[in-house]
Amino acid sequence: MLRFCLLGEAAKPARVVLFGSYARGAATEDSDMDFLVIEPV
């Protein structure tokens, strides 16, 4: 089952960065999505 989270609803991130296999274009059906969320101080 997929779960979705709306980051904009819970926080006000300055930046959201996708990294890992999806960012490289090498994702498979077993890959997850990796995000780095940067919040202002």
Image: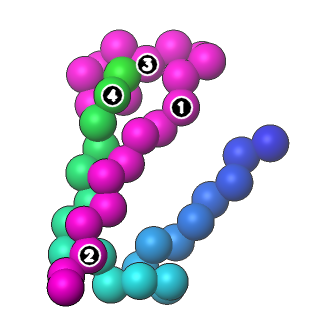
Question: SS of the residue at dot 4?
Answer: loop
Q: Of circles 3 and 2, which is in front?
A: 2
Distance, label 2 to label 1, CA atoms, is 22 Å
From the top left corner, tell me how far across and down residue 31 is, in percent.
Answer: 53, 23
Question: SS of the residue at dot 1?
Answer: loop
Mark 1 Cα-neighbour bin, 10 Å: few <14, some 14–19, many ≥20: few
Distance, label 1 to label 3, CA atoms, is 8 Å
User: What's the residue type where badge 2 is placed?
Assistant: Glu
From the top left corner, tell me how far across and down residue 30 is, in percent.
Answer: 61, 18
Mark 4 or mark 3: name the one nearer the start of the chain: 4
Mark 2 Cα-neighbour bin, 10 Å: few <14, some 14–19, many ≥20: few
Mark 1 or mark 3: name the one nearer the start of the chain: 3
Q: Quadrant of the C terminus?
A: bottom left
**Residue carrying label 2:** 39
Using residue 26 as the reference point, say whether residue 6 is left or right of it.
right
- Which disc number belongs to residue 20? 4
The boundaries of the magenta stretch are 22-41
**Residue carrying label 3:** 27
Mark 4 Cα-neighbour bin, 10 Å: few <14, some 14–19, many ≥20: some
**Residue carrying label 1:** 32
Residue 34 lies in what quarter of the image? top left
Mark 3 or mark 2: name the one nearer the start of the chain: 3
